[in-house]
Amino acid sequence: MNPIDPLSFQRITKAHGTFEGATYFDAEESLVHDVFPDRIVLQTNYLDHTSYAVHLAEGEVRVHKTRLDNYQRGHKAQVIDDEMDEEDWQELDSLWQRLSRDLDTQAQGPGLDVADTLADLFHCLFDEVHAQALVENLPAPTAQWDWAWTQVASALTAANQLAEFDWKAWSSCGIHAVNALAPLRQSGIEIPAPERDTVDAVNRASDWERAVLQYFNARLDAHDLKLLALGTHFDEYQAFACLPMNGLGLVDALEIMGRLGIVHRY
């Protein structure tokens, strides 16, 4: 019934565990799990804040479940131990499958050569000389799950093509941050701050994040530029990159990003 393979657990904690708890983000359920050298704590979206602390004891995987005794009591609720039931094992299986898929690279076999794939991405995003310089200065890949994104973010930041701001501040800080990016400055583009009725219309949109990006891209498309939300996942505070369409170059770049575990939206 226990879905967790002891060897996989050991590989993950050895490669990724830190004493303060390394963060792993489950993008499918918007959950944050913590990886320690000796245990992994997986959270759930259950109202009673159920969590599963997984550890090894006598060569076997053990799971310690905790939850709130009565979540309706709010801050007065107490955290208690509880027994695992069938629904818990199913939930743990689902959580573990996603975490181990991303973090247990040895179990995935030879698969993707991250450095070579990253080199291909740089050649899609930058001119030949710039891309080659980035490739030659790439550090050795590590087992850190967000290593590829860290390299991409660093390269885009150095080229002044990456901005970070809170989605909710798109009409103020966001406008300022995007206007300061190199592609806009080089093309003489300045995106105007929206009027109040425009802000209200965007904020009321059913697909609000897409509406935010469309506000920017409606003014960038004519210049063959695109603003994208990028990262290992989408969050309230987001990284945004301004990239040239470059024919099919951007399409190719986005396909490669997907292979590297980098998500995008535009």
Image: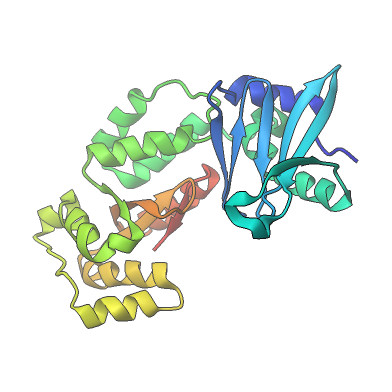
Along the line of sight, the residue nearer the viewer: 21 or 186: 21
* Residue in view at x 77 percent, y 50 percent: 91
The extreme right residue here reads: 1
Colour mapping used in the image: rainbow
Q: Is residue 3 shown left or right of residue 15? A: right
**Percent of width and height locating residue 6:** 80, 26
State the count of labels.
0
Q: Is residue 12 shown left or right of residue 146? A: right
The extreme left residue here reads: 188
Q: Is residue 206 shown left or right of residue 130? A: right
The extreme top residue here reads: 58
Along the line of sight, the residue nearer the viewer: 149 or 140: 149
> Where 156 sits versus 132, above or below?
below
* Residue in view at x 19 percent, y 51 percent: 181
**Percent of width and height locating residue 154:** 32, 35
**Percent of width and height locating residue 132:** 31, 31
Q: Quadrant of the N terminus?
A: top right
Q: Quadrant of the C terminus?
A: bottom left
> Where 186 sits versus 106, above or below?
below
* Residue in view at x 86 percent, y 42 percent: 83
Q: Is residue 52 visible?
A: yes
Along the line of sight, the residue nearer the viewer: 44 or 262: 44
**Percent of width and height locating residue 88:** 81, 48
> Where 213 sits versus 139, above or below?
below
* Residue in view at x 53 percent, y 28 percent: 144
Q: Is residue 97 visible?
A: no
Q: Is residue 168 shown left or right of residue 140? A: left
The quarter of the displayed image where residue 101 is located:
top right
